[in-house]
Image (spheres, rainbow, N blue to C red):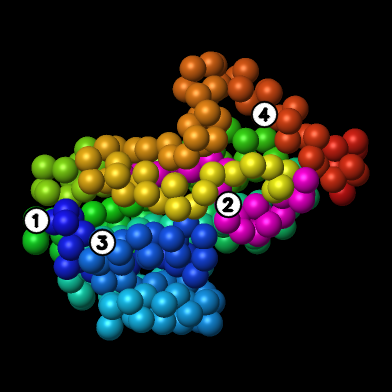
Amino acid sequence: MNELFQGRTALITGASSGIGAEFARQLHARGVTTILVARRQERLTAIAQELNAARRDSASVMCADLCIEEDLKRVAQRLRSESIDILVNNAGRGSFGMLERLPLSEELSMIDLNIRAPLVLAHAAIPGWKQRRHGALIGIASIAALQPLPYMATYAATKAFDFSHTVSLWAELKRFGISVTAVCPGPTDTEFAGVARVPGHFTGAPRDAVETVVKQSLWALERGLPYVVPGLRGWLLGLGPRLLPSWLTTQVTECVLRGILPSDEAEHGVA
């Protein structure tokens, strides 16, 4: 078993469903003790019970809303005070629509969750990792990090930050024995699109399996890759932004996404 995982402890944010819950399961299967962090106590407890049934006392929960300052401080303090070897910065959300029609408070809250929280948690974890000369950071970005997204402008910008920040830390920390990988999933079979309020006929499109996304992400971390675009659909969708000029891909993306806007926004663009 890879020494990166066996006998280690991981703290996973957004662990109550989707990619976060699957990271908990796959890390646990590799011999990792897991600390599950999210807002939804019942879901966290159910996943922890599942993991503890397979290996006693191997999973615990921490109910926290990372947009709330005191909750974020509690999680950061745990990273500073305990020997936590792996941090999966997964918690995040999106939004969809014309910027001026989206609640400003929710856009700012998304910036707190997608940017501020992972930065604070990485900042708390790194000193201990450097002292112990081992540690691992997985930052969940998105293929949106590679491509500006009209009608999801704030979300795409937060993920561009997550990608750049995580890859920068990969270069900064590898000489200290710390592994870092940014993950850029494409459409994945999670509840993300529903939370972002993307219309149903778009959310019903084919998506990559969450098991595949996490498996390929851990494979990339083990091999010291700075980033990975996991899943076949994610990889294919990520080709355009990597091969074509951004002004072109952004215009094409605008045309596609405009087609799934609510009709009043698409036609008039006013409140």
How far across and how far down the image is residue 254, in percent?
71, 30
Q: Which residue is mark 2?
A: 189
The CA span between labels 1 and 4 is: 43 Å
Secondary-structure class at tag 2: loop
Q: Which residue is mark 1?
A: 133
**Badge 3 density bin: few <14, some 14–19, many ≥20, Cα 10 Å:** some
The CA span between labels 4 and 2 is: 21 Å
The range drawn in magenta is 181-201
- Closer to the chain start, of discs 3 and 4, is 3
Residue 108 visible (yes or no): no
Say which amino acid is labelled 3: Arg
Say which amino acid is labelled 4: Thr
Secondary-structure class at tag 4: helix
The CA span between labels 2 and 1 is: 36 Å
Q: Which residue is mark 4?
A: 253
- Closer to the chain start, of discs 3 and 2, is 3
Instruction: Kindly indicate whether the residue at mark 1 contacts the one at mark 2 (C-beta within 8 angstroms).
Output: no
Say which amino acid is labelled 2: Asp
Q: Residue at x 80, y 42 (%)?
A: 261
How far across and how far down the image is residue 182, in percent?
36, 43
The CA span between labels 3 and 1 is: 21 Å
* Camera-side residue of 261 and 32: 32
Q: Is residue 13 left or right of residue 248?
A: left
Say which amino acid is labelled 1: Arg
Which of discs 4 and 2 lies nearer the camera? The answer is 2
